[in-house]
Every structure is written in structure tokens, then in C-alpha cells.
Image: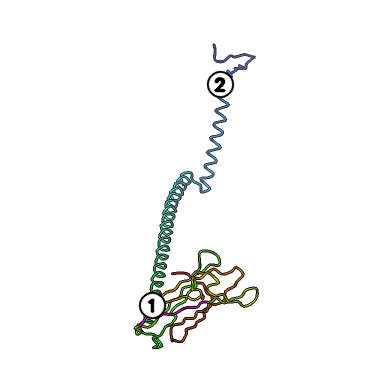
Amino acid sequence: MAESSSLRSGQFVIRSRPPWQRRLLIIGSLLGGLLTLYAAYETGRFQGGYSKFAEIQRRRELTAQIDSLTIANEKLKADLAQAELARTVDKQAYADVEKTLADLQAQVLKHREELTFYRGIVAPEDGIGGLRIQRFQILPGAADHQFRLQLVLVQSMRQDAAATGVVSIAVEGVRNNAPAQLALSQIGGETRSDGQVDFKFRYFQELQQDITLPSDFEPRAVTVEVRSGKLQPVRESYPWQIQTET
């Protein structure tokens, strides 16, 4: 088959091309136009100061900076976590030191109280070696309205004979909007038939009495009276203040 056919008409020769050659020509023309336009676009950008290679290099530099900043950020996070851990450890250590210091202070206070107690037995401050009330405390009980009364009696070591006698305890307060007084025997204390408590000791003795107050009774104070032989009675009144047992 001939690649083209010709038709003579007078002095002119008309040749027709096959369709595939026409399509190749059109495609080539389009590609050439696109390449020309792109070349013109890149030429314009280059003349305007833009460089494709410079842009690629800039992107590489920015990527490197991002990687470096990411590593630095991770390091800062690790340093922050380490600092927080050290802060927590220091805070715990400080709390432990405070607790130890508080315990030591409590022990010192306890030893001072014991020293004062025994000093009162060996050498009373007033120089009187007779019977005295060294300490009185009100402690909470196992249930509501229940309490424990603790009383410490002492006498000087100068005394050769044992101290003997009785103690009377009364709780004063308000009941039905009126002043009221309850004897130890009325509130569950272990007493003799006359409501008193016996004591006998050489240097000191601690007396304890568990009591239960009526629910409608509001305590205000406790009166303690100590009688021993021919000595003058010792009478003290203490405000109603509940203490924590140590």
C-alpha cells in the first residue's frame, strides 16, 4: 500500500496523509508548545531571582533544621522529666526531714515533761515535800460521751512514809439550762461506797477512771480534791479540755 495517494488536477498535485501521521503531528505540536511554555516559565522565574536548585537546597536545610529542633525538643522533654523527678524526690525528702524533725521535737517535749515530773518528786520547786497533784488529763473514750480521767499524785522523795488517802472527783457543767455537778459515782467511776477513790504510794501513783456522761449534760470543768491524814486537803479545778493520748 502506498503511504500516500495523489490526485492530479491540472498543474496541482494534492496528496493526502494517513490519519496516524496527522495525530502524531498534532501531539508533537502540543508537546512542543508545552515544553516551550514551561521553558519560558522557568526562564521567567530564573530572571526573577528564583532558582529550582536553590529551592531544593532550601528545603533540605529546612528539613535538617526541623530534625535538629525535634531532637532538641526531645532532649528538653527528657531534661524536664528528670527535673520533675528530682523535684519530687527533693519534696519527699523534705517531707521526711520535716516528719523526723517533728518526731524529734515530740520526743524532746516528752522527755522534758518526764524530767519535770521526776524533778517535782525529787526537789519540788516550792520546796514543800508534801502531797500534790502533778498532772490531770481528760482523754477520749471508746464511744460518744465516754471519757477517761487520768490523775497523777506525787510526793517528794524526802518523805519516808507512804502517802495514803482518798480522792474525790466531780464534773461540773450545765444540764437542762442549769448548773449541775456529777460525782464520780454518778458517772460510772470505780469508787468506794462513799464515792471516793483510795490511793497509797511512796513517790507517785497514777489513777484512772472511765466515765460516761449523760447526753444532756455539757461538761465545763473537773474538780479534784485529795485528802491524806492530817495534811491539808489539796483541791484543784481543771477546765474541760480533751487531750490526745500520747
At 55% across and 65% down in the image, what residue appears? 144
Report the front residue among 175 and 88.
175
**Amino acid type for the residue under numbered disc 2:** Gln
Residue 218, position in %: x, y?
A: 59, 73
Check disc 1 and report its element: helix, strand or loop: strand
**Amino acid type for the residue under numbered disc 1:** Phe
Residue 227 position (above or below residue 189): below
Q: Hey, which quadrant is residue 181 in on the image?
A: bottom right
Q: Can you identify the residue that label 2 sits on?
A: 21
Magenta segment, which residues? 161-169
Q: Can you identify the residue that label 1 sits on?
A: 201
Q: Hey, which quadrant is residue 18 in on the image?
A: top right
Per the picture, the main secondary structure of the magenta-coloured stretch is strand
Residue 26, position in %: x, y?
A: 58, 26
Measured in 3D between alpha carbons, the distance from the residue under mark 1 to the one under mark 2, in whole angstroms, is 136 Å
Which quadrant, please, contains the C terminus? bottom left
Mark 1, other Cα within 10 Å: few <14 / some 14–19 / many ≥20: some
